[in-house]
Image: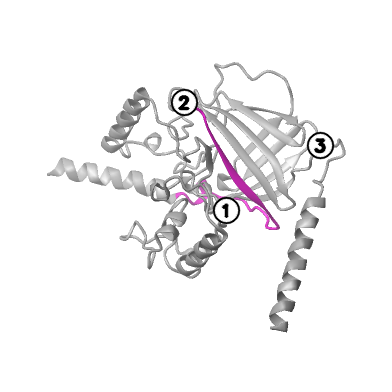
Amino acid sequence: MRHILLITLVGLCISTAVVAQTEDWKPPRMADGKVNLQGVWANNAATPLERPDSLGDKANFTADEVQQLRETAHRLFGGADDAAFGDGVFNAVLANIQRNVSNDGGTGNYSSVWMVDREFENRTSLINDPPNGKLPTITRSAERRFAAAAAHRRDHPADGPESLSRQLRCITYGIPRLGGLGAGYNSYYQIFQTSDYVVMLGEMIHDARVIPISDMPHIHESIRQWHGDSRGHWEGDTLVVETKNYSPKASYRGAAEHLHLIERFSFGGPETLHYEITVTDPTVWMQPWVAMAPLSRSSDVLYEYACHEGNYGLVGILAGARVQEAEALSR
């Protein structure tokens, strides 16, 4: 009993010390007095973009439930079994399946040794507005566009390189990277900062965003870019970045040239950077929506993501399509 009491008291003292240390912590600052966001940050939260239907209105897990999720994740993905990507990790853990099996059983999949460990928190969705944790209803016109695009992809899967996604062509994964492959797979970022610019280097396809900290106007609306045109400013200790002028080809969940982003970067503590984003596109969603992803400070370094150099998959897809066309003509 004395040992148990001693351990409890020591744990209580350590916990109290950590809380006090966090409360006393002050964010690092640049020479100009602005908060120093520089470093490598990992987007490895297992929290899905949207709240699963099975959770209903449940916005938060209890501490015991979070611990159970972590234990289940270790059982499923702590070894060399098939990996799961994006929100698939959370869904598999939530369902408490016995074993994760690749959705590509014919050719196999990445094993879990290729993936980073995912971080579980108490929230049930990254989306916090709407309060139900779901993406807003899409417009009727967006439904028609999405259906037409899906039909075109089905009938013309590999006519040429342009038929394939920008990801398969090693162009860009775009911004924001929330949901899907946004977390847990090449999901590290390095921030560089001066008084006039902030650079955000993404691990995936080594995307680099050079963001002016300026009140100068955005480029003319006729000029469209893969990552849009960004301008940053400070609101206290929060970096706020506004981005618009996206290319029509730079689709994020169906939003492109009318997409408008407001990103907010602020410290949640010494090891956490809160990344909050407000997404607006009235041609796709009936209302704006807001999500927050916690980024964890990392001591790892970013290495070059060599995509084009080994992209034999693109050549194989196109070559296979030509073979299928020839076989169809010979019948």
- Say which label, 3 or 2, has the lower sequence index: 3
Q: Contact, CB < 8 Å: mark 1 with mark 3?
A: no
Q: Is residue 88 left or right of residue 189?
A: left
Residue carrying label 1: 44
Circle 2: is it few (<14), some (14-19), or many (20+) Cα within 10 Å? some
Residue carrying label 3: 34
- Give the CA distance from mark 3 to mark 2: 35 Å
Placement of 215 over or under 226, stated as above or below = above
Q: Is residue 142 found inside the magenta-colored segment of the image? A: no
Q: Where residue 63 appears, x then y in whole percent?
A: 57, 60
Residue 21, numbered label? none
Q: Contact, CB < 8 Å: mark 3 with mark 2?
A: no
- Give the CA distance from mark 1 to mark 3: 27 Å
Front: mark 3 or 2: 3
Disc 2 is placed on an element classified as loop
Q: Is residue 290 found inside the magenta-colored segment of the image? A: yes
Q: In which quarter of the image is residue 200?
A: top right
Q: Quadrant of residue 109?
A: bottom left
Q: Where residue 99 appears, x then y in whole percent?
A: 38, 67
- Say which label, 1 or 3, has the lower sequence index: 3
Amino acid type, callout 1: Asn
Instruction: Give whichever of 326, 173 is nearer the camera.
Output: 173
Amino acid type, callout 2: Pro
- Give the CA distance from mark 2 to mark 1: 29 Å
Circle 3: is it few (<14), some (14-19), or many (20+) Cα within 10 Å? some
Residue 248, numbered label? 2
- Say which label, 2 or 1, has the lower sequence index: 1
